Structures are given as C-alpha cells and as structure tokens.
Amino acid sequence: MPATQHLITVTVENKPGVLARIASMFARRDFNIHSLAVGPTEDPLRSRVTMVVDGPEMEQIIKQLYKLVHTIKVTEHAPGEAVEREIMLVRVNADPKRRSEILDAANIFDASAVDVGANTITFEVVGEPSRLSDFLEFMKTYGIVSLVKSGRIALAKDSKSQSRKQKQSA
Amino acid sequence: MPEQLSGAAILIRSLEHEDVDLIFGVPGGAILKAYDELHSSPIRHVLARHEQGGGHMASGYAHVTGRVGVTFATSGPGATNLITPLADAYMDSIPVVAVTAQVASKSIGLDAFQESHTWGISMPVTKHNYLVTDIDEIPTTIREAFHVAATGRPGPVLVDITKDALADSMAWHGPAEIDLPGYKPSVKGHPRQVKAAMDAILSSERPVLYAGGGVVRAGASEELRTFAEQQNLPVVTTLMARGAIPDSHDLTLGMSGMHGNYTATTAIQRADLLVTVGARFDDRVTGNPDYFAPYAKVIHIDVDPAEIGKIRQADIPIVGDAKAVLDQLLAEGAERLGHDQAPERADWMQTIATWQRDFPLAYDQDPDGLIQQQYVIDELSKRTDENTIAVAGVGQHQMWASQFWRFEKPNRWVNSGGLGTMGYAVPAAVGAQAGMPDSTVIAIDGDGCFQMTFQELITAAEENIPVKIAVLNNANLGMVRQWQKMFYNDRYSATELSHSNPNIPMLAEAMGCAGFRAETPGEVIPTIEKGLAVNDRPVVMEFVCDPDAMVFPMVIAGGSNDEVLMGPEDL
C-alpha cells in the first residue's frame, strides 16, 4: 500500500443511504476513496465499511466521517495491525502449450482455477493485498485479459487496534 | 385506546410537541394532507411567496429567537427551491427543520409529477436529512430532526415524507424516544486543555480573543464578556458574532478581515495568542492563511471537532460548547488569579489604542453630494435602540452595516455570512419580525438583493409583519462593481441596474407597504423618521446612493492581512 494510503474501518448504523452519505461527503470534501467494502457485522443494527483512502488529510477525513450522524466509530489501522483480505478474479492468456506452466505458478500463490477456456484460464485469489499484487505481477508475462478485485476488508488484530478514541459529534 | 391519526396529523402533533409556534412555507400537491391538518392546529403558518423566502424566514426566526425555525414545502420544485436557504443555514450553523413532501412511495424513481430526489439533493447542504416512507417513522424522525438541528453545532435538517406516509393512519402514542448512538456532541471541554489554555492566556503579552458566530449560537455572550474582562483580553468579532460583545465595551475591537477595521485585523496579525471561540478561520477573516496571525499560538474552542485544524493548526484544541467551555475557563481563571488582577498588558493596550485613534472607521458625507451609504446606516442606527434587530443581504451594504451599525446585544444581527446569499434580507427580516413581534426589525438591503426576494413583502403586509427595509439604491450590483473597478480595469460588465430598476416606493405601495424615498443627504433623516413612524404595515425606505462608493478598509482576496487598504488612495 503506498505511503499516502490509509486503511480505515467505519462502523455505522445499518440504515438506508448510509453509503451514499459517506460517498457524498468524500466528494464534497475532495477526499479520495481507493477501495471500499461494505457489509453486515455481528450486530444486525450496524454495518462495517472498510476503506482504503488516499491523501494526507487523514485527521480531517476521520473527523468528517464522525460528523455523519450515523457514524458510530472510525478506526484507522496502522500497517500490520489488522488482518487484511481482498479477493481477485483474473483471466490470463493461456496458450494450451503453456497451460501446465501457468497452473504450476498459480499453485505457488494458492490461486485456484475457476474457469478454463480454449485460450484463457480464470484464477481466483484470496489473501493479503500484497499476495494479490505479486500474483498479478507474475501473470503479466502471460498477458492479463481481464481483472476484477473486491474492496479490501479488514479486522483489527485482537487487542492491537489503534482506535482513535476521539468520538465526538457536532 | 390511543387515537388513530393520519401521518399528517401525527406530523403536526409532533411539531406541536416540539413547541413549534410558527411555520413558514408554501403548500402544494404532495403536502396537501399536512396543510389540511395544519389548518386546525394552533401553529401559525406564514404563507411565503416562494419556498426560498419561506426557508430564509425560518432562518431569520431562528437567528433572533435562538429556537429551531421550521419551513414547509411540497415535493419537486418546492423542495428544490429550498436548497439555497438550507445551504445558507448550513454555512452559518442556523437550526432549521425543513419538512418536504415526496411523491407516493410506490412512485419514487418513476419520474412522477413533481418528483425530485430531495433526499439526495439536500444531503450536502444539511447537517442531516431523512426520507420517511412509512408512517411509523414520523414521530421518531421529527424528534430526531429537532434534536440534531438544535444541539451540538446547530444546522438545518430536512425531513422528506412521502404522500402515502402522510395519508396512512395509525395509533398515536405521543412523542417518540430517540437513540442516536453515533451522535453525542461534546459539551464540556477537557479539563487538562482548559488548564493549558489558561497557562497560555496568563503568560501572553499580546492576546486577542477571536469570537465567532458559535458564541451567539451557544448563548455565550455574557460568558464571553465576563471572560474578556476577567483576563483583560481585547475581543475581535467575526461578521457572524457582531453583537456577541457590546460595541461600546472598552475591550471590543470590532470585525477583522477583508472589510474589517484596521485595528481588529492588525491586532490579530501582531498577537502572540489567539483565543478562538466558535470561529472557523474563514477565508474572509484570514486572507491568505499562510500569512494569518503569524506570531500567534492558537487556542481553538469549538463544538465541532472538524473545525479544529481544518484551516489553522491549533496549539491548544478544546472541543466543547462555547458557553460550557467559557464557564470552565472563567472558573479556572478565577482560581488561578486569586486576588490578583489579570495581567495589565499596558504596552499592548497602548498599541491598540494608538491604532484605534489613527485608523478609525470613517466616512465623509458631503451635504451637497450624493448620499453615502454609511451615512444612512449610521443615522438608522442612531435613531433606533439597542434592541432593534438589524438584517442585511449580501454585498457592500452588508459590510457597511457590519461597520457602522452599533451592535450592543447578541441575536440582533441577522445576515448571510458563509454562503453570501443575495436576497437574504427581506425574507429573513420577515421571519425575524414574526419571531420577535415586539422588536423593531430593520433590513439594510441593496437594490440588487432587494430585487431577488422583495415579493416576500406581500407576505409581510398580508400577515401584519411590519418589517422596515432600507434599500441603499446605488443602481448597481455594488460589490461586484467595486471588484470590477479594482481588478477589472473599470469594465462594468453586467453590474449596472440603473436603467431597469423599478420605482421602489411605488412598488412598495403596490405590495401593501409604505414607501418613501430620499434623494439628497438632507432627505435622509426625514425619510428615516417617516419610516420609523409607520408601524401598522411594512415600510420600504429607498435611499438613492452614490454608485461609486467603495467599501474600505479592504484586504485583497488571497492577500496578507498585513496589507490593509484604507481607501482608494492605497490602490
């Protein structure tokens, strides 16, 4: 992750439109979202938004997130302090002559072939973001036909979370 | 057995439980059911001529009463016309609740007649907003809307309710309980920060207390004055804070910034400490922030944590309500001072007094020349008491009002600061007068602003809301013209109104108001006296003013506050 990117978890009330509020605030304040994943949590009344955000103004981003009435908690994860996962589907050129070579390589990355065509193989890779980018780098030599990636999800490692205890609203 | 009520009836009951006494609005198709219920409610409805007017009325009402202003509009264009007043109230932290109706929930998204995506459109200009599609949600939503609008940093909240939710019925159990786990505004400041602030204040040689609109919104004027006196702190007030401390007070320096007075602007530039309370380092105050208050350590007290560090890094941030934190500082100050007096800071006070003597705010009224706008404002202010509410639109007249009106009390100055909404004055004055029927309300307006919203004087006449409007008619969009003169080589592109301006007294009479005009300096005082004597209907006093008058002092936009232009000779 480039040094200007930060990983944050935003716990919000599970209400309609809460993602639109976050997106609208980011647009209005000229903040940049690099990746985004939203989903349910252990508590049906709450959702968790995991974001990778760009830019140096983290303090403002966190404060502005807290200003949203439906934001309950914002946690910034320092590198290594959270378990981070992404999922990727990538279709690579696979000439029948090189197919076994590609499958061997994929094996090293724990990538599973989920679709095989006449001249392509589609892999699913799940794991830490760095593993996904390493795999992608490796597959570039064969030629990437198409690629889709989920937003990153993260959970603070037990008792290591650097929660910003500054919950205040205005 | 609880009563079975319609959603509309529950809406009106909920508003009654919030002690709403006035609603400013315009009806329409989708909101008909709510208006039908309002017809038999004790709540007074003021029928605006345009939803924008209704929204600004709610804001004017909130400014002077300190209560939440309420405005109603129908779906589609009714709601979109409310966007400007919502944005205006958001910038100036004015508590307003807007209730709009939406097309029936099954029609949402189908481009139905008078459908607009009100929730989405209003989101970036409100503190919070709601789309209610189910009657069940009405009581909770109204309770939440008032709570969010009035607490913490106040602001506008919009509640959009579908036609079917208003029409359905259910059992009414009274006002709802609310639970907002993500909304807990801080009130008290952190005690350690309060101590740190007091250390900085006691050791400061050149402090300035920089007070913003947050002081007025928090009702903290008394605390501000007492604290300034306890610590012997000169006080600069922003545009929104005029009246937070009396102008007649020895410690008051007045307004700083782009059109602030020399002393207030320069005191901040030389200060070694800024005690910032409820102010947000707006660009009209700071000029280029890189050159703003270069020697000052900054204490920043604000109820909104996001304001702290947004523009200027704070050395001592304190998150909390202005009134509560000033109370804490007063207690801390009293304890620390014991029987001692606050530091005298004689050199600093002497320097300030010298600036005040050498660079006062002044104007020249040639008795045989054109009427100077400042003269009109000065005479209006002299002829009214300190309880008079002054209202302004946006532009030159607003800046002169901030300079030459004598502000002695809080909540008696109503203007559009952050958004700079031309046309604000007439409807805001109507709302202020409706909220404070026993006060004199005088709007100082420009001819450009006046022509944006004067139709609300019809509302005022019909509703017996006897506002007084002083139109400083320079037959131009004066502030834009001033910039054209200063920065665009006197090329007056699209700023002259002279050929097309209406006959303002005749227009006033046609709307059911009294209309007067002064064309020479000698007619100014008699016109003011005539205008002040009419109290049974709204009054419009037109003053035909100098089109070339310019607002000074001035700091050029983006420039350094060290370079204050005192007049055209400094250009």
Image: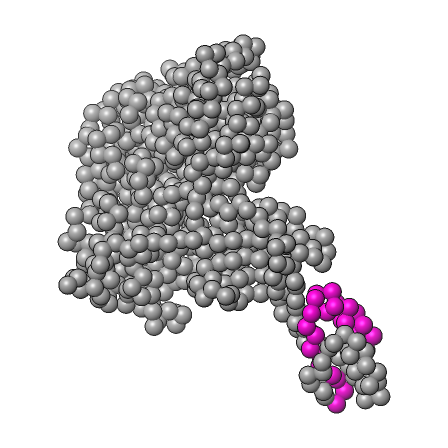
Is B250 drawn above or below residue B495 in the view shown? Answer: above
* B389 and B404: which is toward the camera: B389
Does residue B14 appear anywhere in the picture? yes
Left or right: B80 in relation to B439: right
Colour style of the rendered protein structure: one colour
Quarter holding the C terminus of chain B is top right
Is A23 drawn above or below residue A109 in the view shown? Answer: above
Left or right: B459 in relation to B240: left
Residue B329 percent coordinates (x, y): 46, 26
* B278 and B434: which is toward the camera: B278
Residue A34 within the magenta-colored segment of the rendering: no
Q: Quadrant of residue B272?
A: top right
The residue at 40%/17% (across/down) is B249
Disc tally is 0
Residue A131 percent coordinates (x, y): 74, 68
Residue A128 within the magenta-colored segment of the rendering: yes
Left or right: A111 in relation to B154: right
* B436 and A129: which is toward the camera: A129
Left or right: A131 in relation to A54: right
Residue A89 percent coordinates (x, y): 68, 76
The residue at 46%/28% (across/down) is B211
The residue at 33%/48% (across/down) is B146
Q: Quadrant of residue B185?
A: top left
Residue B99 percent coordinates (x, y): 31, 54
Q: Quadrant of residue A130?
A: bottom right
Question: Which region is colored magenta?
Answer: A118-145
Does residue A28 appear anywhere in the picture? no
